[in-house]
Structures are given as C-alpha cells and as structure tokens.
Image (cartoon, grey):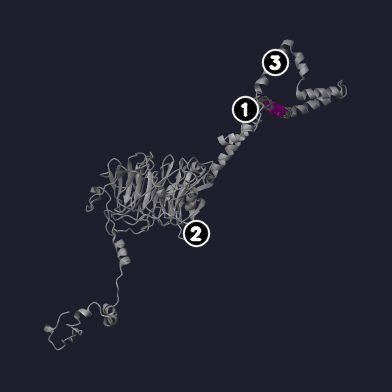
Amino acid sequence: PLVADAEMLGTPDPELAATMGFSGFGKKARTFDLEAMFEQTRRTAVERSRKVLEAREREKEDQTEKEFRIPCTDTSVSASSATGPGSTLTEREAVRSESEALSGPSVQSQSSAKGPGEDTDDDDDDDDDDEEEFIGPPLPPGFKDSDDDNDNDDTEEEDNNPVKKIPDSHEITLQHGTKTVSALGLDPSGARLITGGYDYDVKFWDFAGMDASLQAFRSLQPCECHQIKSLQYSSTGDVILVVSGNSQAKVLDRDGFPVMECIKGDQYIVDMTNTKEIYFSFGFKTGPGAMLNSGCWHPKIKEEFLTCSNDGTVRTWDVNNEKKHKSVFKPRSVQGKRVIPTTCTYSRDGKLIAAGCQDGSIQIWDRNMSVHTKFHCRQAHASGTDTSCLTFSYDGTVLASRGGDDTLKLWDIRQFKKPLNSADGLPSFFPMTDCCFSPDDKILVTGTSVKKGGGSGKLFFFDRDTFQKLYEIEVTDASVVRCLWHPKLNQIMVGTGNGLAKVYYDPVKSQRGAKLCVVKTKRKERQAETLTQDYIITPHALPMFREPRQRSTRKQLEKDRLDPMKSHKPEPPVAGAGRGGRVGTHGVTLSSYIVKNIALDKTDDSNPREAILRHAKEAEENPYWVAPAYAKTQPKTVFAEVEPEDDETDKPEWKKRKI
C-alpha cells in the first residue's frame, strides 16, 4: 500500500511555518491501502456477475418451460394411459419420466451415453465457453436495447412536437443602451455578436471573452450621427456591412476598423444608372441622395454586397472597388413609375435578388439580369406601408415577408400570385422588424411591437406548413424589433425597443455562445488610480519643505469609490454636431443655431422711453453726468416741439403721400 506518513517529515516550528506560508504542517495525511481497495472492487464485481448469471439462468428456465408446455400435456396423457390396467409402471416411474420429458435427460445419463474421453472434452469446452462468455461484469439483460428504445422514443417525440426544439429555457440580457436596438449581427461561427441602435453606437460582444458581467469589449460610432439600420457579417466572417441612415454604406473589419466606404457621386445626375453612389438628399423630397434602407452580403461571394435606398434603386457593390457599383436594379410600379425599396435580400444560392417596396409589391430579379423582374407580386402587402423584412427559407423555395400592415406572409416563388399562408394581428412600428426561419426550416419566428405602457413585446413561433401559432415568449415591456436564430449555436438573439439584446438558449440543445460566458465569474474590479494626487519626491529638500510620506490610500480609495459625488465622471463636452439627445456647443444645423440664440436672447421688450424715464427723478435730484456740464450754457432743458401733422384731406390725389 501507498502510505504517506506525515510524521516522517518532522514537525517544524509553527512560527516558521506561518512565516513561510505553510499552514498544513502538523496534520497527518490520509492513508490509502490500495490492496484493500482492489480487493473490495474485485468482490463487488464477482458479486455482481453472480447475480447477473443467476438472473440469466432463471430467465432460460422460464423460457424452456414455456417452449415445452404443449409437449408436457401430451406426455402427461401418455403417462396416464401407461399407468392404466395392464401397465407395469409405478407412479414414481411415471413422475420420473414426466420430469425427464420436461427437463431433458439427466446429466448422468448424458455422460454415461458418451465415452470417457468425449465427456472430459465436452466439459472442458463448456467451461471454456462459459469463461469466454462471462469475462468481466456483463450488462443486465436488455439494458442496451432499453436505452436505444428510450432514445428513439425521445427523438420521435421531439420530431412530432417542434415546440421542444425551441431553446428558451435560459436567457441572458446584454445592455446595449437606452434606445432601440435596430440591428443585430452574428458571425458564421457564432463567436461574436454585434448590436447597433438608434443611439448611433455599434457594440461588439465576444462570448468567449466575456464573463458574467456581460460587458461589450468595444463600442464605436462608425456613421457619426446616423441611426444604425442593418449589421451583417460576411459569409467568411472577416468583414461587417454597416447600413445607417446616411447615403453611404460602410464595411468594417472584425475589430471595427474601416475597410471600405462607398464614394459619393454627382448629386445632379438624374439617371440612376450613371451615378456612382446613392447621394445626399437636401430637403424633404425623395430623389437622388435619399438615405439607405437595408443591405446584406452575398451568401456565396464574400466580396459582394447589396443595398437599397430611397432614391428608388437596389445596387450591388464590390468591396475591392469602392468607386462604382456593379449593377443597378430599378423597382417600378404598375404605371411604370419609380417606387422606393424598403428592404432587400439575396436568395440562399445567391442567384436571385428580392426587394420589398413601399407600394406593397415584392419584386425579384435574376442577379445577372437587371432589366426585367423574374417574379413579382404587386399586392403582396398594403400599399403605402413599409415591408420591413424579406427572408428565404433554407431550401430556397419559400419566401417569408414581414409587412408594415401587421401581417406575416409565406410565399412560393414558383406560384407568386397568392401567399401560401398568412398571419395578421402582428403590430409593427419599426421599419426594420424582421422574421427568420429555424435551423430545421420548420418554424417561422417574428416579433411584435407595443406602445409605451401597452404591455409586453412578444416573440411568436409559427409552424411553416400549417402557419399555426406554436409558441410565444414574452420578451420585455417594449417592442421586439430584431430576431435572429443562429443555426450552429441553436440560440435566439432578440433586439428590443428599450436598448436590450437578449439571448435565449438551452444548456442541452444549444452549443457554445452564451453558455461560454455565463459560467465565468465576474472579475474583481480594480480601484481607479486616478483619484489620487501625484506625489512629488524631494529627498534633499529642507525639513520644513518636505512633504509627509504618503501612506497607503487603498481604504480611502474604496471610500471615495462608494461616494457618488467623488466618483462621478462628468460628461465630456459635445464636439461638433450634437448626439445622444444633446445639442452641440457649435451647432451645424439651423435648428441648433436657433436653439442657441433663443437661450442667449436677453432683450427687453418694454418701452425704451419708460425705461429711461425711470431714472429721471434720481438724475434731477443728484445730477452727476450730464447736467453739470451744461449748468451754465443751458440751464433749462429744451425739448423739440412736436409739430402737428398736416391735414391732407383737402389736397388733391396727386399731392397726397403714397403709403
């Protein structure tokens, strides 16, 4: 046995042990007897094998008895006839013959029938077979089959009940800000999540690097003072497409550094085919230069992406060529007029481009033919509403559309005149409320909007075939704007109207993602060193000028950190245009200039004559400034006499003054 004897090491001085940091001296180590442990394990295995063998023998005997139940009845009849008149068999012999018929010949009779050599060989073979069959503790009878049956039953039950596939048993909440989370993006591997909102911020979340505090590792404003409308990783996950309320789409790398920005072209060119970019709009009309509405990456070509804007075009771009677009698609109404596309997407194979327009139509083009549409439905949704989302199923045959008319519809692009299924009563207040398919392509998910104080925003799950509502999740007391169901992680990401990004997952069904960060403990926050003043060391100064030596300020720092007044960080001044609801110091817009002048306007609207005469009595009693200078030359004040206006009623018309 392996025995660790602590006494052999000796017992050191307790003070020395405490000084060196060894607190375990003086305690005896546990003694482990390995031979006794092995012996106990062997006995347990032997006992278990014996019980299993007995159970198998008992089962074999029962099976043999069932097989010979019918021959047993025949044997009993023959035995009774043999014991009739004229028979020489006794009752004991009849019973013996009946038992032999049930259990077969006895061991002695079998051994006597064989030769002595054959007997020994057969016994040895039987012993060898038994030893080979029962080496080690065998599994109980039917153990493996029962597990397989249970697994098959569970799998069949999950297939029959799609609700059990929804990973909603656990959730985490990521605090993006206080305003609406209008964009969500997750890279193909599921390692990083990006969120964008109405507060112009884009935040990066790394599931593997986060702890339980759930803090973003980077925050930036790539489009300055423009709301973020769409964020998406490319098919390889190395770059990010950012679509905001301005006219230029941007491409960032994984860490948020700019890679490409679409160039601005001539805003006076009317033909959209010959323009270089989607241009700035001045005023309220929509035309060349209106803002972007949506964008997405090509699912197969990693350098190509798609945008649509209020100038009435859908454009494809190449990351390597920021000077000019690749192709332009122009949606048209029934009368052939320009319509504004509010959302756009690629098909799963990248061969089709679909756009939802403000006139309620859905128009689909072949990617290589931009002149005429390949499929179109003129009355897909109500005219004048913004179709907020289009998404293709994973098999590529079905298209789902989320309309601004509070409906969710499913279309077969091969029969595009009438929807396959439709669901109404789904309020949508945001132009980017989206929908998505589950990884198995059997469930369709979308969110609903609510007014402030009007209840909770919900996430609805519909069956793709029957469009029956399967399940709903109450997310929060605000609208549900964005939803994303990642196929690899099997987790659902939701963006809400109150600045939250929620992640729903199941510990068993989901993979990685939120499971990586919830198990990590929060890191201990280190006290800020900026609260202390710099200490100047002057070793050769006179004693009267020497500063007292600075002691440890850890406790004082902790107290200052708890004090809300001392630990309050003032907000930095706003440089340039205002953002986040704050007006800039030097406004660049007309409205900010007016607000600034209104705040500085201190004009007195009272009568100026009355304002001067308020001081007349004091000036007469105590003349100081003007009256002493004119005391000798002008002792009396002389005012101009007011001449009466001439009566022009008697004058002819040509002499009267023209007003």
Q: Is residue 55 magenta?
A: yes
What type of secondary structure mainly makes up the magenta span?
helix
Q: 649 left or right of 611?
A: left
Magenta residues?
41-57
Residue 639's quadrant in the figure? bottom left
> Crowding near pointer 2: few (<14 within 10 Å), some, many (20+)?
some
Q: Residue at x 74, y 13 (%)?
A: 114
Query: Where is residue 278 drawn, in percent x and y?
Result: 28, 50
Q: Is residue 242 above or below residue 646?
A: above
Q: Which mark is residue 9?
A: 1
Q: Is residue 598 magenta?
A: no
List the residue tagged with mark 2: 455
> Crowding near pointer 3: few (<14 within 10 Å), some, many (20+)?
few
Q: Which mark is residue 124?
A: 3
Query: Where is residue 414 drawn, in percent x and y?
Result: 39, 45
Between discs 2 and 3, the one toward the N terminus? 3
Element carrying mark 3: helix
- Amino acid identity at mark 1: Leu
Label 1 and label 2: CA atoms lie apart by 71 Å
Between discs 3 and 1, the one toward the N terminus? 1
Q: Nearer the viewer, residue 219 or 6?
A: 6
- Amino acid identity at mark 3: Asp
Q: Which mark is residue 214?
A: none
Q: Is any atom of residue 467 visible in this view?
A: no
Label 2 and label 3: CA atoms lie apart by 82 Å
Q: Quadrant of the N terminus?
A: top right
